[in-house]
Image (spheres, grey):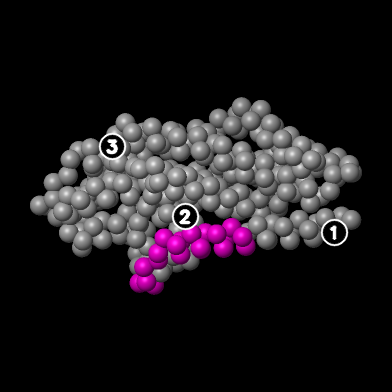
């Protein structure tokens, strides 16, 4: 019951701060506008180069393919960066001394730590699902080829990536003690994470050395999962139009639906396993850190 009140209190504080809330929510919207304005033509050109000249695709199908890549990039980044905004409540409580006040109450330190983690996850999930809804509206307006199962799998990807982002931001936030620090870290993550996970630029366009380095990062596989489920409908439609399997494989390589670990293709199930194991490890690290802190305080 105490945990419930801690979570409720933190979620209310986050959504009560209109500045932080709208900043978090507007991130996927701004990315969608920027991507659609500046990157749509780049993506179209990359698709054209991957397909043979004999293949003629409708404008709607091309837009559906481009739209799937756009929204997958947005969701892959937002699901990790939004938790850094949501985690500001925990850092603010340390900065203004609220944590010290709470620590002298009957509330256990472990309950507080779990409450901060779950409230960050819930707040981030609400915003990212709202962002996903906006992205689906965009796809519907440009070129819709998604099925119900693909939408559900996309929602699962968002869920797992938010868990990953929450665990990562909670570990980083553990060492921060001011709002300025978490804002600076959030800015660095927002600007850098998109590149290293392959959201801003497909990994296939990196040098072979960088591709091998990035293949060790779990966020890369999270991005590929979102790519696969956001673009699967349009890719299936292209395949139905008689595109050769070699051209389809090249196209999926270009958009990072196919990922390779030292020339070995990584399956979808392996991507889920990598992401799941990473989340479990990060949560374990966060738990151990807070356990030691509580034991030291006791």
Residue 233 vs 197, above or below: the answer is above
Say which label, 1 or 3, has the lower sequence index: 3
Find the magenta span and give its range: 262-281
Left or right side of 93 for 36: left
Question: Quadrant location of residue 139?
Answer: top left
Depth check, front residue: 239 or 192: 239
Q: Which residue is mark 2?
A: 222
Q: Nearer the viewer, mark 3 or mark 2?
A: 3
Question: Quadrant location of residue 245?
Answer: bottom left
Say which label, 3 or 2, has the lower sequence index: 3
Left or right side of 186 for 194: left
Q: Residue at x 52, y 39 (%)?
A: 128
Q: Which residue is mark 3?
A: 143
Name the outermost residue toward the front: 148
**Residue 211 coordinates in the image, percent (x, y):** 39, 65
Report the Cα–Cα distance between label 1 and label 2. 35 Å
Say the numbered circle drawn on residue 233.
none
Depth check, front residue: 128 or 22: 128
Report the Cα–Cα distance between label 3 and label 2. 24 Å
Q: Are marks 1 and 3 in contact (CB under 8 Å)?
A: no
Q: Which residue is mark 1?
A: 295
For disc 3, the neighbor class at 10 Å (few under 14, some 14 to 19, many from 20) is some
For disc 1, the neighbor class at 10 Å (few under 14, some 14 to 19, many from 20) is few
**Residue 70 coordinates in the image, percent (x, y):** 36, 43
Report the Cα–Cα distance between label 1 and label 3. 55 Å
């Amino acid at each position: 019951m105490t945990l419930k009140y801690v979570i409720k209190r933190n979620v209310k504080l986050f959504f009560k701060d209109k500045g932080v809330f709208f900043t978090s929510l507007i991130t996927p919207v701004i990315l969608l506008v920027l991507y659609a304005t500046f990157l749509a033509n780049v993506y179209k050109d990359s698709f054209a180069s991957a397909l043979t000249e004999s293949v003629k695709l409708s404008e709607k199908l091309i837009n559906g393919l481009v739209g799937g890549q756009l929204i997958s990039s947005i969701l892959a980044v937002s699901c990790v960066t939004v938790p850094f905004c949501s985690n500001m409540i925990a850092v603010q409580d340390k900065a203004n001394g609220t944590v010290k006040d709470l620590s002298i109450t009957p509330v256990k330190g472990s309950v507080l730590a779990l409450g901060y983690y779950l409230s960050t996850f819930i707040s981030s999930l609400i915003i990212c699902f709202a962002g996903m809804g906006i992205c689906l509206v965009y796809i519907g307006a440009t070129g819709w080829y998604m099925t119900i199962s693909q939408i559900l799998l996309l929602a699962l990807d968002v869920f797992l990536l938010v868990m990953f982002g929450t665990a990562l931001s909670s570990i980083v936030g553990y060492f921060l003690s001011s709002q300025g620090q978490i804002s600076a870290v959030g800015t660095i993550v927002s600007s850098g994470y998109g590149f290293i996970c392959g959201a801003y630029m497909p990994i296939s366009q990196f040098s072979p050395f960088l591709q091998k380095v990035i293949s060790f990062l779990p966020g890369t596989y999270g991005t590929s999962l979102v790519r696969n489920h956001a673009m699967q409908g349009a890719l299936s439609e292209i395949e139905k139009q008689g595109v050769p399997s070699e051209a389809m494989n090249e196209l999926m390589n270009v958009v990072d639906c196919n990922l390779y670990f030292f020339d070995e293709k990584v399956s979808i199930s392996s991507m889920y396993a990598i992401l799941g194991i990473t989340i479990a490890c990060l949560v374990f690290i966060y738990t151990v850190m807070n356990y030691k802190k509580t034991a030291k305080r006791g």
